[in-house]
Image (spheres, helix red, strand yellow):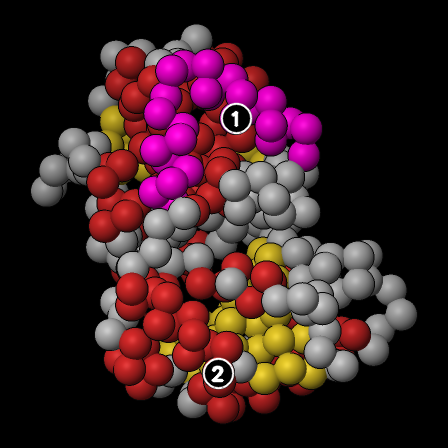
Amino acid sequence: MDYREAAAFLAAHDNYLILTHKRPDGDTIGCAAGLCRALRRLGKTAHVLLNEDATALLGGYLDGLTAPEGFTPDTVVSTDVATENLLPDNALAWKGRIDLAIDHHPSQEFFAKETCLEADKAACGEIIWKICGELGTMDGEIATPLYVAIATDCGCFVYANTTPHTHRAAAALMEQGIDFQALNKRHFRTKSVARMKLESLIVEHMHLYHQGTVAVAPISLELIAQAGATSEDTDDIAAFLGQLKGVLHTATIREHQGGECRISVRTKADELNATRVCARLGGGGHKAASGCTVKGTVAEAEAAILAAIDDQLSQPNQD
């Protein structure tokens, strides 16, 4: 369904539970918070399922919005979730029972009963903004998390996915009187000492391939400990390597407990399709930004993602 039909669906139902994806980013959290507040403005009962992986930087947007223990919804909605495999553990009970998925990922698997997909949007927040317009609900409390959703998914409007529509949506949200300067400083211009130490170690341990156009950063648990960093210090760390002169494509490998490595791939999309790279390893996302998970050591994960990159670069057509 399109955004108008999604708005009509939301207006016609009630008693909502909103789901976000595992390893939540600003888009999934911001969309859930903004949509929840919009539904409440309509007099609906709406809650967001607690996401225990949310960092302190993002978790605050859900204050007062999370579902009470034992809450039983009539309508389940997911925001920015491309596949049920991305649901956090406490949301797995809702697999096969999601009524509406609102998403912008080309790799959307259409797992919900209804899906509102706009794959040309830089952020799912742009779609929620349009839906709120149809519902006639918008104020500063709704606009704030939606601005965060949009700004974080396009790197504060510098990533290649940024479009005129992205700017129009952000401008409309700014017109609600939100403190966008404070939001931008908080999410894009504030770093802890540990984060800066981690970035220094990443540069020291990264590897360059393909005449310096491909950078791979293995971030082991040992490296994180050496920097004195926490999970919050690694937020959006995948964007860091892209700042290196001459680098077109990057893979950031983040080791987690239990022998699992999560890989974030960022590419110059017209030369390397990140979705196809990550699909080889069971992941997905966007042409310029995708992710996957690999079991094994950091070295094994690096070999796996490099092989996927090499294979895709050898293909004649990247569209």
Residue at the image point whose x is 89% and y is 70% from the top: 316
| CA distance for labels 1 and 2 | 37 Å
> Dot 1, how many residues are within 10 Å of its Cα: few (below 14), some (14-19), or many (20+)?
many
Find residue 311 and report its horizontal and vertical position in percent: 75, 80
In this rendering, is residue 65 above or below 275? Answer: above
Q: Nearer the viewer, residue 174 or 38?
A: 174
Q: Nearer the viewer, residue 228 or 4?
A: 228
Q: Which residue is mark 2?
A: 204
In the picture, the quarter occupied by the C terminus is bottom right
Q: Secondary structure at mark 1?
A: helix
Q: Nearer the viewer, residue 99 or 153?
A: 153
Find residue 160 and report its horizontal and vertical position in percent: 67, 47
In the picture, the quarter occupied by the N terminus is top right
Residue at the image point whose x is 79% and y is 74% from the top: 313
Residue at the image point whose x is 73% and y is 57% from the top: 269
Q: Identity of the amino acid at label 2?
A: Glu
- Most distant residue in the top direction: 136
Is there any visible trace of residue 52 in the rendered image? yes
Q: Which mark is residue 170?
A: 1
Find residue 171 and report its horizontal and vertical position in percent: 53, 21
- Residue 174 is one of the magenta-drawn residues: yes
> Dot 2, how many residues are within 10 Å of its Cα: few (below 14), some (14-19), or many (20+)?
few
- The range drawn in magenta is 163-187
- Magenta stretch prevailing secondary structure: helix
